Amino acid sequence: MAVSNPAEYSPKRNTSFVDWLNRHIKLIFILPSLIFVLAMMVFPIGYTVWLSFNEWNGSARQSPQGVGLSNYTNLLTADPRFWDSVLRTFLFSFGAVVAELLLGLGIALLLQGKFFGQNFIKTLILLPMVATPVAIGMAWLLMFEPTIGLLNALLRDIGIAPQPWLGSEQQALWSLVMVDVWQWTPMMALILLAGLTVLPEEPYEAARVDGASPRQRFFYLTLPLLMPTIVVATLLRSIDALKTFDIIYTMTRGGPGYATETINTYGYVQSFEYFKLGQASSLLVIFFAMVLGISLLFIQVRRRWGVQA
């Protein structure tokens, strides 16, 4: 039987197809996973953005009603509770990240040298990161308890009056910062310790020969050389701190009053207590834009310090 188009079965054409297949076989294998991951990212974000232009209470009997930009305008111009939650979110994140950076750098410098039990101590400081946030919140609730809590017992032992901690509108947010610092300082310390271990020795040897003091070596060598690692660690921890929800909701649920209500807890209340899903979606879109802007700012800082984003 005659072949209608012999060129389709030529060895040259088959060889070209095999070469193309060999060049792209890795992409072919990961393509299903890539499509799945993109779908799981794009659909929730796209649906949230679409829902932010609608008003819906989650009822199956009533479909979402389009309201345009009114959800955004109400949040930005007529909802002081939203702006208060934004301020608390950034206060919480800034306080936690700065304290974790300073403490983590100090711990990293202490762990940098060789000493007996170094590996055991490195393992020990990881324990706060192993526990679940809800378990950590419950444990710290017991320590913050005004009458029988461990912290007030220690304060009484040294002659200081017991504190209300989570029961005070002035202290509640900073008490949550304390918990966050306790939990995540080890991660900051390990990242900075990894950066310290790869710093070159030659500049330090030259500085010692020139008679530089330990303080001068730290401020003129260690900090500049470690700055790219500091920026990366600060970026990762800042994004995570801005998203903190579990510890805050477990310990205070945004109280007392609204003293610890952040964007995340306010979005939860709008969604699952007030059932204003459209307004909650617009809040999350604004929050996403804020986090994205901060991330881009940190990326520019990374490039400033000679690290490719």
Image (cartoon, rainbow, N blue to C red):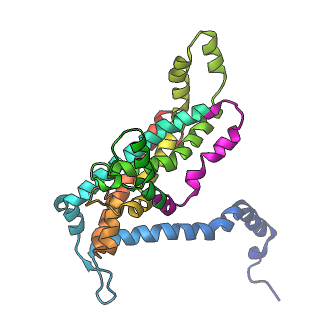
Furthest-right residue in this view: 1
Residue 32's place in the image compared with 296, above or below, is below
Furthest-left residue in this view: 78
262 sits left or right of 127 in the view: left
Which residue is drawn at the image coordinates 57% and 38% (left, top)?
192
Residue 272, percent from left and from top: 34, 74
Q: Nearer the viewer, residue 156 or 17?
A: 156
Answer whether residue 198 is visible to the viewer in this image: no
Q: Nearer the viewer, residue 261 or 222?
A: 261
Rendered-image quadrant of the N terminus: bottom right
Inspect the magenta stretch and tell me whether residue 129 lies in it: yes
Residue 73's place in the image compared with 120, above or below, is below
Give the number of callouts.
0
Which residue is drawn at the image coordinates 53% and 43% (left, top)?
188
Which residue is drawn at the image coordinates 46% and 67% (left, top)?
42
Answer whether residue 138 is visible to the viewer in this image: yes
Q: The magenta stretch spans which residues?
A: 111-137
36 sits left or right of 163 in the view: right
Mainly helix, strand or loop, the magenta region? Answer: helix
Residue 173, percent from left and from top: 34, 51
Quadrant in the picture for residue 74? bottom left
Q: Nearer the viewer, residue 5 or 73?
A: 73
Residue 67, percent from left and from top: 22, 74
Residue 117's place in the image compared with 4, above or below, is above
Quadrant in the picture for residue 120? top right
Inspect the magenta stretch and tell me whether residue 142 lies in it: no
Residue 220, percent from left and from top: 51, 21
